[in-house]
Image (cartoon, rainbow, N blue to C red):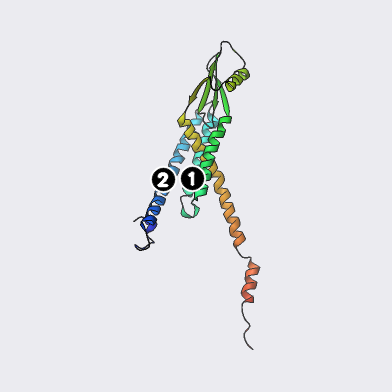
Amino acid sequence: MSAMTEGLTEGEATPRDIRRADLALLGSQVQVAVAVLSVPVGLLAATAGLGATTMLSYYLTFGAVLMAGGAVLLLCAYRPLRLSLWQWVVVLAAAVAGTAASLLISRESDGGLYVFSLHAGYPFDYVVWSADFDQVIPADQARAFIRDNLGSVRSGFEPMAMLMDAVFWGYVGLLVLFPVRQLIRLARRDRSAPEPDTADESATGSEEPAPA
């Protein structure tokens, strides 16, 4: 029997309860492992960005979000701060929506006088479109040609880069969700707490005067 079911006696703990508790414990262990791993990986990415030139800001941004997100994810493994199911859905939705929306963020590169490439994705580009031209043309014309002919020009897809982007945007969602959730909890707690004057009046009003 896992530690999650220690408070239940054998008569109270049904097999279904035990399975749920074991799954919850396994989920917490995976969460802690991912959180602990995220911090050094984020630090490594930020350090690698210091030695880069064109991708400097992207590596630093990815590393900073990964370290901060890993720290918050580790906090959320603590029972009072655990995320509910719908909050995990919000984090997952942020990962999917952010990764898809990052296709709108494009960067350009040229592989020579007659080759032009368009990279999409943030912080790492996971889709690349390239086109060859017979002569040197302005960058804006090459960009417009690629965007008008996405289905016919050469394209490349990097699944690992897309996975890193998804992790990045999931952590962004978590970093936004966590403080908002804590503020909502504090607001609800303050709203439900009785005012001091009201509490004192109700306490004194409930006392019956002693008979003369």
The percent coordinates of residue 10 (x first, y second) are 34, 62
Please tell me how many numbered marks the rendered image carries.
2
Q: Is residue 171 visible?
A: no
Q: Earlier in the sequence, mark 1 or mark 2?
A: 2
**Label 1 element class:** helix
Q: Quadrant of residue 136?
A: top right
Q: Residue at x 62, y 18 (%)?
A: 141
Q: What's the CA distance linking mark 1 and mark 2?
A: 14 Å
- Dividing the image into 4 quarters, which one contains the N terminus? bottom left
Q: Residue at x 48, y 26 (%)?
A: 157
The kind of residue tagged 2 is Val
| Residue 139, above or below 31 | above
Nearest the viewer among 97 and 48 is: 97
Q: Is residue 35 visible?
A: yes
- Dividing the image into 4 quarters, which one contains the C terminus? bottom right
Label 1 sits on residue:
71
The label shown at residue 54 is none
Locate residue 187 relative to residue 47 in the image: left or right. Answer: right
Of badges 1 and 2, the one in the foreground is: 2
Label 2 sits on residue:
30
**Label 2 element class:** helix
Locate residue 14 relative to residue 125 in the image: left or right. Answer: left
The kind of residue tagged 1 is Ala
Which class describes the residues within 10 Å of circle 1: few (<14), some (14-19), or many (20+)? some
The percent coordinates of residue 25 (x first, y second) are 40, 51
Locate residue 30 relative to residue 134 in the image: left or right. Answer: left
The percent coordinates of residue 104 (x first, y second) are 58, 30
The percent coordinates of residue 69 (x first, y second) are 50, 42
